[in-house]
Image (cartoon, helix red, strand yellow):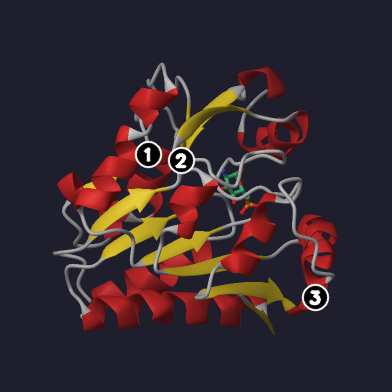
Amino acid sequence: MKIVYLEKTEIEKEIAQVFIDEIKKNPSCVLGFATGSSPLGIYKNLIDANKKGEVSFKNVTSFNLDEYIGLNENNDQSYRYYMNNNFFKYIDIDIKNTHVPSAFVKTNEEAQKYDEMIKKMGGIDVQLLGLGSDGHIAFNEPGTSFDSLTHIVDLTEQTIKDNSRFFNRIEDVPTQACTMGLKSIMNAKKVVLIATGKSKKGVIDRLVKGEFSEDLPVSILEKHDNATIYVDKELK
Ligand code: GLP
């Protein structure tokens, strides 16, 4: 794992370039996408590159990290809605090749079919991650097993509070999600994480100090041999 400090706009450009390079190397690659506010600038760069004809997503397959339980794709807070409306509708990806975990799985056994689908496609070539202020990646909250595959999770109070900024009322934030697990994420061949915003400082400090524990889910990336954490210079 490598930590790189850059300006936010530089991070967005660099990560977009990682995806562009991957697609140029293998136009049928499998990409892992994330939601939240941090990736929006990356998607904007990719949309621009696609519009300019610099890169095509025609043969790309994508898998998203997570989805709120109970929100269907027409709900503007669902992650499927986010992906369609912030990214997919502006690029030439075939929507049939885009995947988001189901909001309606009832058991972990059902949820794990997502890992099987990813495996069938040959695994994720580049996985994008954001970071929760409690150190979560995807929706793997502190205490999640490092061996976890896609599963249903109860969101922590902190995450519900953090994410309530996108909802009308905190009561509207779903209390559960279906998320790729930490092991699912570690299976990606390359991982790029964007950490911007002051609320991430505490978690980044713990990571820099070398903390490695299930209490800090992002710390699993210390064991990944091709993971880069891009941190906003302001958090140094
Ligand atoms: C949610 C998502 C995470 C994301 C996090 C940070 O909890 N499940 O995948 O990393 O938000 O979001 P933001 O980028 O808005 O800070």
Give left or right: position of 76 versus 174. left
Q: Looking at the image, do the residues carrying marks 3 and 2 touch, with CB atoms under 8 Å apart?
A: no
Distance of mark 3 from mark 1, alpha carbons? Answer: 31 Å
Residue 174 in the image: above or below residue 67: above
Q: Position of residue 190 (x, y in %)?
A: 43, 71
Q: Nearer the viewer, residue 83 or 141?
A: 141
Which amino acid lies under the numbered mark 2 shown in the image of this protein? Leu
Can see residue 35? no
Q: Residues within 10 Å of mark 2 (few under 14, many from 20)?
A: many
Distance of mark 1 from mark 2, alpha carbons? Answer: 20 Å
Which amino acid lies under the numbered mark 1 shown in the image of this protein? Arg
Residue placed under numbered mark 2 in the picture: 149
Residue placed under numbered mark 1 in the picture: 80
Place residue 30 in its image quadrant.
Answer: bottom left
Q: Position of residue 123 (x, y in %)?
A: 30, 58
Mark with earlier residue (3, 2): 2
Q: Which mark is residue 212?
A: none
SS at mark 1 in the image:
helix
Mark with earlier residue (1, 2): 1
Distance of mark 3 from mark 2, alpha carbons? Answer: 33 Å
| Quadrant of the frame with the N terminus | bottom right
Q: Position of residue 150 (x, y in %)?
A: 44, 37
Q: Residue furthest front?
A: 147
Residue placed under numbered mark 3 in the picture: 234
Q: Nearer the viewer, residue 79 or 211?
A: 211
Q: Residues within 10 Å of mark 3 (few under 14, many from 20)?
A: few
Mark with earlier residue (3, 1): 1
